Image (tube, grey):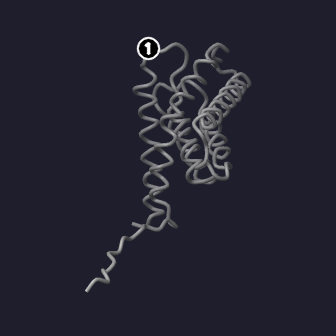
Amino acid sequence: MTPKQWQYLIMGLLVLSAVILQTVVAARLPLPGPPLGLTLVVIVGIGLAAGTTAGAASGFSAGLLLDLMPPAQTTIGVSALLLLVVGALAGRITDPRGLAPAQLAGLTAALASGMWLLGQGLLWLLGDPVAPLSWLVWFVLGTTILGVVVIPAVTWALRRMEPGRRRRRRFKTASAAG
């Protein structure tokens, strides 16, 4: 397999594991407010590491999986649209390697709050049940804390498989002593 194919495989495994962990584990944690946005955090990491197209494609597929998982109670496609936008916006960051943890937390908080507000507006327009506004604080706080831990790991895993990355070879130099 080529390095690009490995990168796509890792993205797919990250998306699938994030969706399963969010719906099976995070949704059942006795935390106040909504479940943690693990899938959102993984999509932000993919967007930062692989760019706009990969972030948008990963976001759409993760959102569609979230919409189709059994406990879903919203209109199909809402999460797909929201995560597509988040992945594309995260992919627009030109050089995320220089982000400090505080900047990463700010970026995650901004994307999480924007996704939450846009999602609740869409659900209200579609006539679906809307969560209370107090859940916004819990969602953004939990997702931001989770993002500071998970996003660097996701970007590291994807950058290890970049196609243009060269591996350093160490050559032993012959000693000039005779």
Question: Which residue is more in the foreground, 65 or 175?
Answer: 175
For the N terminus, which image quadrant? bottom left
Q: Which x, y percent locates residue 67?
A: 54, 33
Choose top left, top right, bottom left or bottom right for residue 119. Answer: top right
For the C terminus, which image quadrant? bottom left
Extreme residue toward the front, this view: 177
Q: How crowded is mark 1: few (under 14 residues within 10 Å), some or many (20 or more)?
A: few
Tell me the residue that label 1 is attached to: 30
Question: Which residue is more in the foreground, 133 or 162?
Answer: 162
Under mark 1, the amino acid is Pro
Choose top left, top right, bottom left or bottom right for residue 14. Answer: top left
The residue drawn where x is 65% and y is 21% is 128
Question: Which residue is more in the foreground, 89 or 98?
Answer: 98
Is 178 left, or right, of 159 in this rendering?
left
Give the structural element (helix, strand or loop) at label 1.
loop
Question: Which residue is more in the foreground, 20 or 44?
Answer: 44
The residue drawn where x is 46% and y is 30% is 22
> How many numbered callouts?
1
Q: Which x, y percent locates residue 176?
A: 32, 83
Q: Does 116 sit above or below residue 101?
A: above
The residue drawn where x is 74% and y is 25% is 125
Q: Does 63 sit above or below residue 170?
A: above
Extreme residue toward the left, this view: 178
Choose top left, top right, bottom left or bottom right for residue 100. Answer: top right
Extreme residue toward the bottom, this view: 178
Q: Does 121 sit above or below residue 132?
A: below
